[in-house]
Amino acid sequence: MRQLDRWNTYKLLAGYFLYECGRAMYFVLVTWFLYQWTEDAIYTGLFVSFGFIPGIFSNLIFGVLVDRHNRKWLANISGSVSVIILCLLFLSFVFSWFSPWWVILTHMLLQTCGSLFRPSLQALVAEVFKEEELPNIFSLSGSATISGSLAGAALGGLLSTFVTMPLSLAVVILFYCSALTAVVFLQYSPVRRLSKKHTSFITEIGEGFSFLNANRMMYGLLVTLMLGQLTFHTTLGFLSVYTSEYLQRSAIIYGALDITFSIGGIAAGLLGAWWWKRMENHIAVYSLAAVAAGLLFVGITKSITAAFLGILLIGLGTSFVRALLQSVQQMATPKELHGRMASLRMLCNQTSVVITGPVFGVIAKNYGAGSVFLFLLIPVLLGLIWSIFQARHPQFIKITSHKSA
């Protein structure tokens, strides 16, 4: 690898890791604070759900923007606006100007920025690196993303236990600024897209759907990735309620569970290449099986030991799904459609959370937080069955047999 490519790799992975670390840290801090403040799981469900509502409407537009315009420029803008929003939230806590709905509103704005930042950065990879380097870069960036998000969850759990909320948010802002700096210094020569100069937004959105419709394997990938994201966000979102209301434990146990979740995810990041090579076309089958086992352990018992084991399996399984299958999806997508397919993937992910968030909030309030994980087990088992059939798809077999991923 050339020196320039090596430094670009370091900066790209740093950007992924730092951004996801800050995002997950923020999410854990705010969900714990919100439940402890309101003592109402419905607010937790609304926070998780409403945060993704803007993405349902913006993702398709953002996908076209990413495929049309300078991807680094878009990532820098969305990252900068994210920092501004976090600063406003920080000031509201410093001066005690906050309410549950203010917290939810700022979360919605922050999630909207993320809906532009993430596909911009993902699509940027295809232009910064050579085609033969992409499988390895996709795998490394996926591992950096998962490791960052789960390390951030662990740090968020620790901060929520020992540090005040304003100081914790200051740490989050520092991570976001560091991630933005890493992206700013990426060496990038934008590709000119003259052929799309007079094409309408609607036409380009339609091209994304046409590609999806012509490549049926993508449906299975999007569904499996959706289940990974839904389980990931639901687990992080309701872990505070689960610890406080269901296990009846303190913030110290909450932090320990977050760390355990992170250990599972970091292990998946370190073992991702080995897992890919070992499981090949069955990577989704065994990853979802681990998730299902974890959900069962967490949902059926109040044993601390079972809870830690279940959370570890959920962190491990969802990380394998999110990192490795996203790599499969990117490798199966032409460069010119990376932005739109990333946005379609996020659209599916976020819609699932929007729909289920309030439902899980009501379930947690009326039947206990453990029931949330048992209800979540149903779609995961259906996805497990689907992944068995997907493993036989010729294109899926071809991509997953690629040893350099």
Image: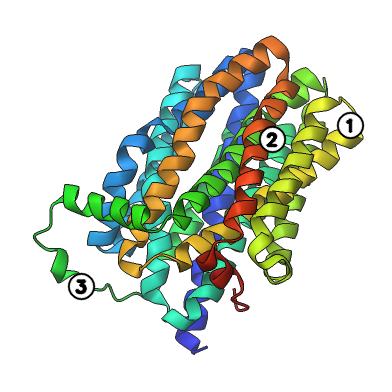
Q: Secondary structure at mark 2?
A: loop
Q: Residues within 10 Å of mark 2 (few under 14, many from 20)?
A: few
In this orientation, does residue 55 appear?
yes
Q: Secondary structure at mark 3?
A: loop
Q: Secondary structure at mark 1?
A: helix
Residue 405 sits in quarter: bottom right
Residue 194, percent across and down?
Answer: 14, 70
In this orientation, does residue 83 appear?
no
- Identify which residue is drawn at 67% across, 17% down: 364
> What is the CA distance from the residue labelled 2 to the residue labelled 3?
48 Å
In this view, the mark in front (1 or 2): 1
> What is the CA distance from the residue labelled 3 to the residue labelled 1?
56 Å
Count numbered badges in the picture: 3
In this rendering, would 198 be left or right of 387?
left
CB contact under 8 Å: marks 1 and 2 = no
In this rendering, would 366 be left or right of 347?
right
Residue 140, percent across and down?
Answer: 58, 69
- Identify which residue is drawn at 58% across, 42% down: 227
> What is the CA distance from the residue labelled 1 to the residue labelled 2?
25 Å
Most foreground residue, 37 or 220: 220
In this view, the mark in front (2 or 3): 3
Mark 3 or mark 1: whose residue is earlier in sequence: 3
Q: Which residue is mark 2?
A: 163
Q: Which residue is mark 1?
A: 304
Vertical position of residue 224 compared to residue 351: above or below: below
Residue 311, percent across and down?
Answer: 77, 40
Q: Which residue is mark 3?
A: 192
